[in-house]
Structure formats: structure tokens, C-alpha cells
Amino acid sequence: MTKTAMIRTRITPDLKTEGEKILKKLGLTTTEAVILFFSQIKLQKGLPFDVKIPNRTTLKAMKDAEEGKGLHSYKSLDDFFKKMGV
């Protein structure tokens, strides 16, 4: 019995490159990330995140954010908390 199994998949080169850049910043290899993902699937007995179709409100918020509409900036974290009433 083998101690490892192989997974093969195809993704776009851009997705692979960008994903690997992020994983490198996190100190993970692609293999380690896949093992982590599958470990979480096993632990959660399903995907380790919600998979949903966004509703109209969420889609609008996503579009607005992409277009930079309704975004606010703050001088500091303290300024943000003050404006939030915290």
C-alpha cells in the first residue's frame, strides 16, 4: 500500500501564478496548501467555507466595491473606531 496518492488538476496559468505567490507569502507550498485544504474538508465533513450564490444586495455591494463607490478612508485605526462609535 502506498503512503501517498497523487492529485492532478488543470487551472489557468494566471490563477496558478497568483495563487503560488500568495502561498509563498504564507510560507506554504502548493502541495502543503492542498493537504491543508483536504484536511479541512475531512475535519468539516464538507467544504471549509460556505458556497452560496450571492443575492442582489451582495452583488451590488461587490460591484460598488470594485468600482470604488461608497468607500471611506480613515487617518488611523483610532479614527475609524471613533467614527464607528467604538
Image (spheres, grey):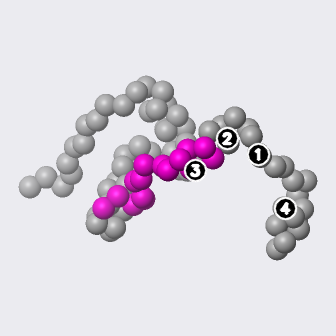
User: Vertical placement of 26 versus 7: above or below?
Assistant: below
Q: Are marks 1 and 2 in contact (CB under 8 Å)?
A: yes
Instruction: Measure the C-alpha gap from mark 3 to mark 2.
Output: 11 Å
Closest to the camera, between mark 3 and mark 4, is 3
Task: Report the side of 68 relative to 23 (left or right).
Answer: right
Q: Which residues are magenta?
A: 46-61
Q: Residues within 10 Å of mark 4 (few under 14, many from 20)?
A: some
Say if the magenta span includes residue 50.
Answer: yes
Give the residue at mark 4.
80
Closest to the camera, between mark 1 and mark 3, is 3
Ranked by sequence position, the earlier of labels 3 and 4 is 3
Give the residue at mark 1.
70
Q: Residues within 10 Å of mark 1 (few under 14, many from 20)?
A: few
Give the residue at mark 2.
64
| Residue at (42% x, 58% y) in the render | 50
Which kind of residue does numbered mark 2 sit on?
Asp
Ranked by sequence position, the earlier of labels 1 and 2 is 2
Which kind of residue does numbered mark 4 sit on?
Phe
